[in-house]
Amino acid sequence: MTEANVTAGSDRAAVVTLTGDVDYSNVRRVSHDLRSALPDSAVGVVVDLSGVEYLDSSGLHMLFELHRTLHGEHREVVLVVPESSPLRRLFKITGLDEVVGITTDTASALALVTPTEPAE
Amino acid sequence: MRERLGALLPVGSRLPPAHWVRRHRAVVVLLWLNAAAIAGVTVAHGFGLAHSLLEIGIVPLAAVVAMTAHSRRIASVAASIGLLSASAVLVHLSGGYIEVHFHFFVMVAVIALYQDWLPFLMAAAYVFVHHGLVGGLAPESVYNHPAAVANPWLWAGVHGGFVAGLSVVCLVTWRFSESMLDESHVARERAVREGQMFDRLSEVAKALAAEVELPRVMQKVIDAGTEMTAAAYGAFFVNVDDGMGGSYALHSLAGASDDDFAGFGMPRKTALFGPTFEGEGAVLVDDVLADPRYGQNPPHHGMPGGHPPVRSYLAVPVVAPDGTVLGGLFFGHPAVGVFTLDDERLATGIASHASVAVRNAYLHESENRAREVAERARARVSLLAEASRVLAASLELDVVLTRLAEVVVPELADTCMIYLVGDDGELRLVTGAAVPELLGGATRTTPRHPVAANPNGPVAAAVESGRSLLVEDITDEYLAAAVDDEAFLPMLRKVRPTSAVVVPLRGREGILGAVVPGTLASSGRRLGPDDLEFTEELAQRAAVAIDNAKVYATQRSAAEILQHSLLPDRLPEIPGVEAAARYQAGGVGLDVGGDWYDVFLLPDGAVGLVMGDTLGHGLTAATVMGQVRNALRALALEGYAPAEVLTRLDRMLEDAGPPDTMVTLVYCIFDPGSGVLRLANAGHPPPLVLGTGAEPEYLGEGLGIPLGTSTPSTYREVVTTLAPGASIVLYTDGLVEDRGVPLDHGLDRLRGVLGPEVVTPDQLCDVALARMLGGRVVEDDVAVLAMRYLPLGDAVRFSLPPSASVLKPLRSTLTRWLGQLGAQDDAVFDTAAACTEAVTNAVRHGCGPDERFEVSMEVDGGIVVRVVSPRPWRHPAGRPGGGRGLTVIRELMDEVDIVTGPDGVEVVMRRSLQGAPAPTAQ
């Protein structure tokens, strides 16, 4: 069962957790759920993929698109992927790791999406 | 003169033997008395013995002859001689004493008793000769007075004259006696004759009493009459009341064959026949040709040509006790003057017996008719009751129509056609039946092509007007006008309908059609007004049954449509598992059941299996089933566990379901990746798990009560792991329940029939149905669903529809396969990822709507996965993500070949089971 849930976050960042498999059969729904889960106020989004066993090219595409959309809104996306996850190889093959930040845990991810505001 | 004298004189020798013997005996006794008297006188006179013997000798001699002679004549003559001799001897002995002469007178009178001329004349002659001769020769021996002695001849004449006088007186007496005798004789003869006549009439009466059939009665009457009157011909005409206000004439003939009279009409009330038919009395004519009444009536003026020749004619009316003339007896003879008054009396006697017999025959006939009518009525009442029963016994329109036709044929009619108004308003012949012998075989002939009724024909008219119609005589013209169907008319003409009844079938909402019983020429029977009445009664019942069948058909088909729409058209194809299902509808005439099954794929790639049974039948059950099915799917897709799904369904039914619904249900989730099966059961017969190597086992008994019982309940779940190759069989109770057999027994049987040789889900379903139901159609619906966890060998091959839903289970199965092969995690992930990309392309681009693609996996050093789709991928690289798919495939596999040809695309991917993928050429 693939689910996208907002599980934690702060005033300025949201943590969305995906579980299960993401492939062509459910990517539209997952994508919709993911975007719905994003609060408008969040300037940064952490997508926790620790519970995702498999993600196909359409899932990759979803992540690329998420990045593109949010980037246009000056919002950051950071993925949480365990070091041992085979997804890391996919991200590497497709170059996703070059456009979005990838961390191994939520805390560092949150730190990445909410850089200290320059004091003004 | 001579005749006259003959008439005056007695005939003689006519004494009846008994009388004669009695008189003769008296005479003989007298003879012996005379002999004794003579002997006495002789002794008294003192004659010598010899003289005495001589004197008396002649008398006893005569007596002996008289006693012994066989002939009446000789006996009477001997006795007469003896008597007169006694007189002569006595006169002689007395010495001519005149008073002794009186003895002569007495003896002559005695001799007259014989009433026979010979002894009588002899007696007269004896006296004359004796007196004349003896008197002349020896007068003193005859007379004792001088005057006589002096003139013996004179005195002989005197004595003779007195004897003659006596003789005359005797003759007169004799004559009277004779005529008296004659008269009594005639009377006796007459009595005898009448007695015989009476006897014969009695015999006739007795013979007639034994007959009750009118034609036989008539034949016996005329046969007896013709014989008894010694007629040459006899005819008996009877006017028969047919009991229905008409009459017809019957005749029986004797002495002539029916053919002789075939050409003649019945005798009419002519001058000659009239008195007989008017019942006026007997007509006896010695010569009919000379009778003034003969030949007066046109057209024949006498006997018609060819009539047997008749001169003597005798006719008597046959009149019933109430004076009704029933008919007449006619006798004829070609000779003149044959019939006597006795014949007339005989004929009259026979006629009176005939009237009784004919009356009896009438009574018998009418009694028979009454009994027939009563029996017919009774038979019809029971036929109607039977019809009501059989018509009500079915709700299938076809069956109702067939049974209606079967009730009519052959009891009521030879054929039966049933017309119904179709949904389009057209009246068509829908069912026909006929007595098979009359049609040469076929009992029921439902027209191959519907025959539309002639809109101007009698059936359409009856349906239009609602009025029944009886056609007692169907002519060819009528038939041609009534039936306009070009194929049907010649068929009808061939079997030649003779009569028919058309009765509209009056339903609740108008006229449904018409039932048309008919008769055919070959049977000889005809339909009448009472048949019309009966058909109307029958039609009333039939219309109710047809109405019910129609309503039922509507409801049933709605329920059927609903149920069919709820059962999966075909099961989803899920790589790694194989499933099959069967649904056998219940017996004819029963409502659609509420059984259903469902197989669906859950979002996480697991398979949902459902088997349910809604209590009850028909539309309501089908509706509940639909609600439960959809609710279950919704809950399942939400990811609820089986027990949770049941608990929620129970609550839903309680809150929103129709009242008094109860559903039994098994829901399991099977994960083809891990082989884990989770099962919950709401009062349903437990599924059977088999093919595990061990004995088949029932799983999930006693996990909960049926849904909708309004009893708050918690459903538990059982979890097991199916080994590859194992199967689970779900079913409804119809499969294992049999009347009078405990459920346990059915469960044991099911376990027994599904042996290790029964492997695939198709086999499991078919064998379960065949062996458990034995080919019979059970009353209840039966559903069976089997799923097998496919064992994976070195080579696996799937042919799949282009559905994205196959992706996850395919990946699970591939993962399972690779795990079996001992592949490392990276290799498993890489292969699954590459395969998913290739299959995604095949699903998205490689297939037309009804086409399939193939996935095969085999071991070949490493492993080889092939994905073959029938169409070229359209712009795979131009699509967002599509390009990345190919990149993923190439990067993760050791070797990739993508061959695009006119027959589609074949992707061949190789991967070693260990380590990272070898760098591939881009």
Image: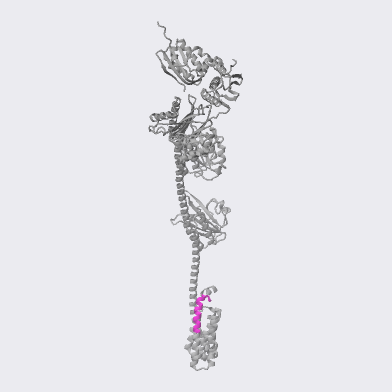
- Which of B342 and B96 lies nearest the eye of the viewer? B342
- Which of B692 and B260 lies nearest the eye of the viewer? B692
Is B165 drawn above or below residue A106 in the view shown? below
Residue B329 percent coordinates (x, y): 51, 57
Residue B356 percent coordinates (x, y): 46, 57
Extreme top residue here? A120
- Which of B311 and B463 lies nearest the eye of the viewer? B463
Position of the N terminus of chain B, as image quadrant, is bottom right
- Which of B347 and B854 lies nearest the eye of the viewer? B854
- Residue B897 location, quadrant: top right
Q: Residue B26 magenta-drawn?
A: yes
Image point 45% across, 10% down: which residue? A74
Left or right, residue B1 beside residue A120? right
- Residue B846 location, quadrant: top right
Residue B94 shows in the view = no
**Segment colored magenta:** B10-31
Is B229 drawn above or below residue B731 in the view shown? below
Q: Residue B869 magenta-drawn?
A: no
Residue A7 shows in the view = yes
